[in-house]
Image (cartoon, grey):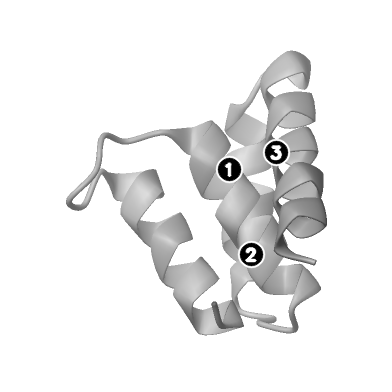
Amino acid sequence: MTAEDMYRLGIAYSIGQDVDADLVAAHKWFNLAVIKGFADARTYRSEIAQQLSSAELANAQRAAREWLKSAN
């Protein structure tokens, strides 16, 4: 999966495009896109982080770490 694919998933989850809107999932995908070098995702990740509770943000970050581990 490319960084752009991850970015597009972040967009889809952030606006509910073809999936249920889920800001935790959106943050996860934007975070992964940034990690993979897709700098445009950084702004969206920051905007979503401001809308999440501390627990939700921790869940999103944990999900990103778990995805990275499973992908390697």
User: Few, some or many C-alpha atoms within 10 Å of disc 3 (few <14, some 14-19, many ≥20)?
Assistant: some
Residue at x-position 77% and y-position 58%: 68
Residue at x-position 72% and y-position 71%: 34
Residue 48: which numbered mark, if any? 1
Residue bearing mark 3: 63
Residue bearing mark 2: 43
Q: Does label 2 or label 3 sit earlier along the sequence?
A: 2
Q: Is residue 14 visible?
A: yes
Q: Is residue 42 visible?
A: no
Image coordinates of residue 28 in percent, x first then y, are: 63, 48
Image coordinates of residue 55 in percent, x first then y, are: 75, 15
User: Is residue 65 rendered to the left or right of residue 41?
Assistant: right
Identified by mark 1, the residue type is Ile
Residue at x-position 46% and y-position 76%: 5
Nearest to the observer: residue 43 or residue 5: 5
Nearest to the observer: residue 65 or residue 20: 65
Q: Quadrant of residue 1?
A: bottom right
Identified by mark 2, the residue type is Thr
Q: Does label 2 or label 1 sit earlier along the sequence?
A: 2
| The C terminus: image quadrant | bottom right
User: Is residue 18 rendered to the left or right of residue 70?
Assistant: left
